[in-house]
């Protein structure tokens, strides 16, 4: 009887020659805001009680007054933001929750506080025909002892693809 040894090699490599690769280039997001921004207007404070001014986060930017009054025919309104981007991609919007308005002139060193609000959704938003418009309004507290003068500030809004 003959006995022999035979070497058998197992296959130790495998390959695929039809693996797929792809990419989709999307339009970068851009964000612009109207030149006037969020405008509370000229407000006459109460000398006996704290008050507030609210600007609705909408295209009308309706102003509501509590305890305080406004100068007749004065201009107020919400900040209008326009996002442009790729219609097929959703994005999110993040804004500052509050704004500090700093006084100038006689009101230097004094501040006013604004809590912001926004129209629409903050996430899952997408453009229609390449653009999406939203508004930022807010509620500004006006203490009865607030120093008269001009107040201004800035706030940040960021849009990001999701």
Image (spheres, rainbow, N blue to C red):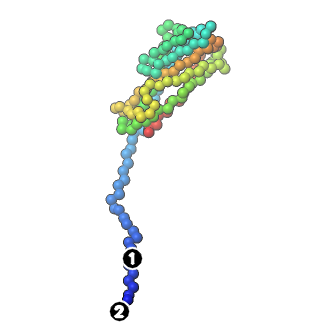
Seen in the picture, residue 83 relative to 24 is either above or below; the reply is above
Quarter of the image where the N terminus is located = bottom left
Question: In which image quadrant can residue 108 be found?
Answer: top right
Q: Residue furthest bottom?
A: 1
Q: Residue at x 37, y 66 (%)?
A: 14
Q: In the drawing, what numbered circle is on residue 9?
A: 1
Report which residue position mark 2 lands on: 1
Q: Quick one: 55 or 12, which is closer to the camera?
A: 12
Question: In which image quadrant can residue 143 be found?
Answer: top right
Question: In which image quadrant can residue 113 be found?
Answer: top right
Q: Residues within 10 Å of mark 2 (few under 14, many from 20)?
A: few
Horizontal arrangement in the rendering, residue 38 relative to residue 142 (left or right): left
Instruction: Tell me where residue 112 appears, x and y as whole percent.
Output: 60, 19
Horizontal arrangement in the rendering, residue 142 relative to residue 63 (left or right): right
Q: Residue at x 40, y 36 (%)?
A: 90
Q: Is residue 65 visible?
A: yes
Q: Residue at x 59, y 10 (%)?
A: 45
Task: Report how many numbered discs are placed on residues in the image.
Answer: 2
- Work out how far the residue at label 2 is from the one at label 1, CA to CA, in angstroms: 25 Å
Instruction: Tell me where residue 83 appears, x and y as whole percent.
Output: 42, 31
Q: In the drawing, what numbered circle is on residue 59?
A: none
- In this rendering, which labeled residue sits more in front, label 2 or label 1? 2
Instruction: Tell me where residue 89 appears, x and y as whole percent.
Output: 39, 38
């Amino acid at each position: 009887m003959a006995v022999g040894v035979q070497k058998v090699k197992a296959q130790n490599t495998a390959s695929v020659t039809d693996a797929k690769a792809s990419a989709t280039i999307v339009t970068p997001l851009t964000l612009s805001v109207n030149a006037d921004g969020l405008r509370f207007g000229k407000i006459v404070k109460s000398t006996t009680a704290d008050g507030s001014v609210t600007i609705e986060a909408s295209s009308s930017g309706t102003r509501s007054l509590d305890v305080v009054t406004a100068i007749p025919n004065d201009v107020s309104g919400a900040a209008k933001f326009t996002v442009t981007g790729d219609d097929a991609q959703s994005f999110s919007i993040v804004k500052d929750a509050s704004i500090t308005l700093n006084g100038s002139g006689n009101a230097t060193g004094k501040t006013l506080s604004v809590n912001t609000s926004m129209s629409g959704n903050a996430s899952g938003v997408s453009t229609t025909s390449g653009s999406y418009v939203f508004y930022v309004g807010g509620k500004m507290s006006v203490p009865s002892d607030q120093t008269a003068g001009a107040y201004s500030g800035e706030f940040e809004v960021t849009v990001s693809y999701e």
